[in-house]
Image (cartoon, rainbow, N blue to C red):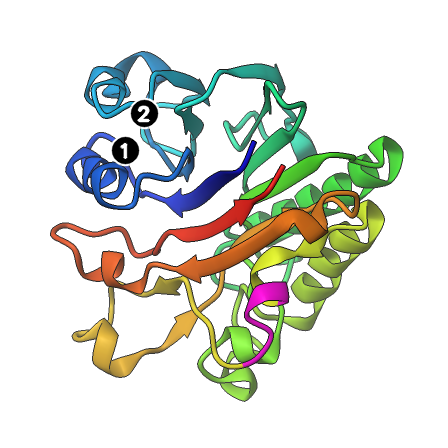
Amino acid sequence: MPFTLATWNINSVRLRAPIVAKLMKEEAPDILCLQECKSPVEKIPTEMFANLGYTHMIARGQKGYNGVAIFSKQPIEEVGVHDFAKLGHARHIAGRLENGVTIHNFYVPAGGDVPDREVNEKFGQKLDYLTEMRDWCRDEAPSKSILVGDLNIAPREDDVWSHKQLLKVVSHTPIEVEHLNDVMEAGGWADVTRADIPEGQLYSWWSYRARDWDAADKGRRLDHIWASPDIANAAHSSRILRPARGWEKPSDHAPVFASFDL
């Protein structure tokens, strides 16, 4: 059952419902995973999305913050949530498709502005969250699984506009990259996007602070699609929909896509 999946930090699903609908109409992924929905589940505009063919949804909501949701054209069954680092945040949800594939949708903490857990509690929470993700991967040994989401780390030198200038900036510090690589190694995960696009600068996020984000192009690849080793070879056709960053009232993230022949 081949399918195409997209992941997108939407930065408020209600505020940006029109561009979610635009993506559903124009790109029509079979499954759309959203992060930072910033909405209680009951206030997500599900009727709008169901009218576009996305009749199945599983979600964890939170008023004004965080929040993850999976919209699907195919039946999907919720199979669990994790509250890593015991933050009490809506940052993970897992769903299983009828073909047995489990999709884990994550929104990893951003980590604040200062990359020092001694002076920045949020940075410590981020590292603790990633450590517990690593332990979960090690204990569960995920199989027939896809992990997606805003992981809030750009791991490779060519995942940021300037490796040298961002080495001390949260999202690209060596300790964060090390923690993310530990998660990947513990689960045997394959970075689907970079397997398909192995070379060159690649970004999925551009700051709102830039006067002209497209011209400045100071991006980072914070959004990821991973596959467990048993299905990694089934993934193909990865892409990042950069133009979506320029849509009306955009998120600061662009959607990331991959297809799977399963």
Task: Please tell me which residue is depicted at 41% across the width and 62% down the height of the picture.
Answer: 204
Look at the image and tell me whether residue 109 can be seen: no
**How many marks can you see?**
2
Residue 118: numbered disc: none
Crowd rating for badge 2 (residues with CA inside 10 Å; few <14, some 14–19, many 20+) = many
Q: Which residue is at the far left?
A: 248
Mark 1 → mark 2, Cα distance in angstroms: 7 Å
Q: Report if residue 198 lies within the magenta region.
A: yes
Q: Looking at the picture, which amino acid does disc 2 mark?
A: Ser
On screen, 59 above or below 255?
A: above
The answer to whether residue 196 of the structure is visible from this angle is: yes
Principal SS element in the magenta part?
Answer: loop
Q: Nearest to the eye among marks 1 and 2: give it.
A: 1
Residue 50: x %, y % from top left: 27, 18
**On screen, 198 above or below 77?**
below
**N-terminal label among 1 and 2:** 1
The residue singled out by tag 2 in the image is 39
Tell me which segment is drawn in magenta: 195-199
Q: Classify mark 2: helix, strand or loop.
A: loop
Residue 208 in picture, x, y percent from top left: 25, 63
Whether residue 92 is in magenta: the answer is no
Q: What amino acid is found at the position of numbered circle 1 in the picture?
A: Val
Question: Is the residue 29 above or below the residue 54 in the image?
Answer: below
Q: Which mark is residue 13?
A: 1
| Circle 1 Cα neighbour tier, 10 Å, few/some/many (<14 / 14–19 / ≥20) | many
At horizontal 66% and vertical 57% (from top left) the residue drawn is 118
Q: Residue at x 69, y 36 (%)?
A: 145
Query: At which x and y percent is residue 19?
Result: 19, 42
Discs 1, 2 touching: Cβ within 8 Å? yes
